[in-house]
Image (cartoon, helix red, strand yellow):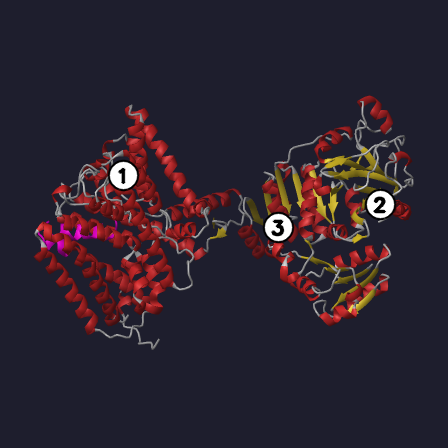
Amino acid sequence: MHIIVVGAGEVGYHVAERLSSQQHDVVVVDVEAGRLDYVANHLDVAIVEGSGTSTGVLEEAGIRKAGLLLAVTNVDEVNLVSCMSARDVGGLVKVARVSNPDFYRDARNLKSGTFGVDVLINPERELALETTRLLESTAATDIAVFAGGAVQLLGFVVPEGAPIAGRTLVQLAAEVGHRPILLVALERGGTTIIPSGNTEISVGDHLYVAVRADEVGHSLGLLGYEQAHLRRVMITGGSIEAYYLARLLPEHRVQTTLLVGDRHRAQELAEQLDKVLVLHGDATDVELLELEGVGGADGFVALTESDETNILSSLVAKQAGVRRVITLVNKRDYIPLARHIGLDAAVSPRVSAANAILRSVRSGSVIRVATFEGSDAEAISFEVSPDSPVVGRPLANAGFPEEAIVAAIIRGPSVIVPRGDDTLEAGDTAIVFALPGALEAVSELFPS
Amino acid sequence: MNLREVLHIIGALLMWTAGAMLPSVVLAGRDGLVVPWLGAVLVTAVIGVALWRLTPREVAINLREGVAIVGLGWIAVVLAGSLPFLMTGTTPRVAAAVFESISGFTTTGATVFPVIEELPRSILLWRSITHWLGGMGIIVLGVAILPLLGMGGAQLFRAEAPGIPSERLRPRIASTARLLWVVYALLTAALAVLYLLLGMDLFEAVNHAMSCLATGGFSTRTASIGAYSPAIQWVTVVFMIMAGTNFTLHYRLFSGRWQAWFRDEEWRWFVGSMAVAWVAVYLSRGLGEGVWGAQALREAVFNVTAVHSTTGFATADFAVWHGFAQVVLLGLMFMGAMGGSTGGGFKTVRVGVVVKHVAGEIQKVLHPQAVVVTKLGGRPVRPDVLHTVLAFLALYVVTHGLGTLAIAAMGHDLITSLSAALAAMSSIGPGLGEVGPAGNYGHLHSSSLTVLSVLMLLGRLEFYTLLVLLVPGTWVRSSRQGR
């Protein structure tokens, strides 16, 4: 597919990289030559210099043959006008990134009529949603949701003393009486494998598990974690992500404290937020954090713009005894590091944004739904057509490559976390977890 | 300030007042009081026409003129309003006549007459008309109807309308004022019809409807609404709540937004505190005096509503109720109705803002680094508005203290002095002690009546409008701006 990406910033670069590696023809449009040069030097994409709001520039980027326009600059207005300029192009799906809460609130108006936006992406809000889920799932290091949240794909590190450690899923099933969870991937010593029922699990393994949302608590128990109630959370940072999180948490009846470094921004947030205690102060001011009782909090989320500040204040929080500490990390290299020094989970704006955008990219019957930082596996959603060779055959011998596994089946309103004897039917949506090597083989199983 | 231009407008207001007396002149025939009534109309009209004719026509109203028009205009109108009481000989005391007129226009409803049924019908109607005109505001009516106020309308509106300035219904202030008056008139008509259906005669229905919607309190009976059936009392409760509600909300409701009331934070406080007071008063009488049952419930609900909405109708002598109930009522007298309503008092919205502000200050003690923003309906209250509210609180408390002192100096007991001053400032009417619902203000010394008259005017115009008249700077002649 011919895809135009407007904006060569962090999000634009990352999305272009992903799409280009998936064999799409990508053209990146930006006003700044410097950034475009960087893109051209690192990625296999075409570049066009100019404003994405101009019809002429879009024509030059090949808007007439494009199937997808991704307007992802960090200026909402530019993204909206860009979609508007391409409004009359037939068969084009227009995706706009919108961060400003005022715009996002009017999502319905932006979609209908003048602007002609098909999909609105709000990376900051996506990150806040992901953070909320991470906070609530007690132990997860990663989280991705499908089917509007009905199925969750959780990443876990197996702790000392977990019931599952030293056993295989088959052994465990014999004890519990049924297959409790679906293990879709296992990361051990830097490599990701798709395990079978007979793979033995050991302490320190990083597991990816598919569970129905209503069974999360149960599976946590098997993995050696207790589900704890979230009562008080402290957030640091005055970012848009922090704003969205501070709006979401009180809705879940969580007592929220927001620590903002900039006085003016603190005032602004205090005006916009209800039921949140806004404080002005430095995120690494240990005395202040202690005064505000950081140790008694159930969760701590570091969302300032600086990775170093986030990691430092997260360490302070962890030291004080906060059970769940989630850290925003921009630099890719820091993510494994953060986990290594004992922080519970890291979130990345880049990955959140890319996941949100990639979810909207349909290529034939395929939607890429999630990628995981620190692992090359990907979750992909397929629509099952009647001519697919997998229809009606038990999954165990439907011909899936070893490096891929069906993590969930969405059939109408119900969601199935499948076992080997379940079958796929025409009209289902299958969520497949696959390593890069298996992608092509899997795609052949799902012809559009 | 350009005094001549101010006098010009006041002339117009006096002509209006004379016009408002005409319905009473019609009724005066049966009372045999046509001549004194015509006298009152004539005096008012002649002064009005004289001021109007002798002052310049092209009017430039700026801030100072606006405030002066409202302040001096009210004084002129209430003085003219006292003429009928004096000229018909209803009372020979000037202080009493002025008190009754001010009590009418400020929608207080405190009366100097012990037996209402003895008053001529033309006078009864005039009392109700003063309520009705003062309720939504005589100047607001002027802004709505007299286009000549033109540019200065907004200042006039703000100087007279109670509470924290709320958003306009229409971009133009004159259209806003007109809409509010239309809503007001429609509600009054609706209540009059309901009263008729429930068995009042036409005269009583019209009088009580005007008195109720203005949150006044004058009745045609000594026993007030207590003289009528329970059904009438319940209907009155509903309309007193509506009269104590911001009229902007009524307009919204009528234009199809049915959640308009419930969405408004101040309305929720108003009705919430009302409901709490209903229960508190009913329980305190039940537990304290052993008075339970349907009648006790109705009395509790009616009188609490009458006081909270600052109407001041009564169906029972709450001055003899259990002490706890009386203190609750005293608290409601202070709190008063909603901003933008026809009611008086400190205003529910200001109470809410002060409470939230204090809560924020407590928060700051616990969290020294906290950034606290006082919000109203989800929007931040601007610091200057907050300061005005706090200054208003100080003015209210100090003025009330001085008023209490002045009345106590005339030899009245603490409860009487305290409640009379508060009932006057908050435009309630009946207080506690000697001036409770069963009593009246007729036996008070003229100097006490004068003090209360001043308090009523101060409370109705929310202090500043009158107080600036005492500041010499207001009277400095400003350069003529060719606006």
Q: Are marks 1 and 3 in contact (CB under 8 Å)?
A: no
Q: Which residue is mark 3?
A: A243
Of residue A142 and residue A298, the one placed in the foreground of this image is A142
Q: Amino acid at mark 2?
A: Ala
Q: Chain of mark 1?
A: B
Does the CB distance between marks 1 and 2 fall below 8 Å? no
Mark 2 — on which chain does it sit? A
Task: Say which residue label 2 marks.
Answer: A377
- Left or right? Give the position of B411 relative to B182: left
In x, y percent, where is residue A3?
79, 60
**Marked residue nearer the N-terminal end (2 or 3):** 3
Instruction: Give the Cα distance between marks 1 and 2.
Output: 78 Å
Q: Nearer the viewer, residue B223 or B480?
A: B223
Question: What residue lies at 77% left-to-right and 45% top-to-bottom?
Answer: A338
Secondary structure, mark 1, is: loop
Q: Nearer the viewer, mark 1 or mark 3?
A: 1
Q: Where A300 falls versus A163 (above or below)?
A: below
Element under disc 3: helix
The part of the chain drawn in magenta is: B83-107
Quarter the C terminus of chain B occupies: bottom left
Please tell me whether mark 2 or mark 3 is closer to you in this view.
Answer: 2
Q: Is residue A271 left or right of residue B61?
A: right
Q: Are marks 1 and 3 on the same chain?
A: no
Q: Is residue B343 visible?
A: no
Residue at mark 1: B198
Which chain is home to disc 3?
Answer: A
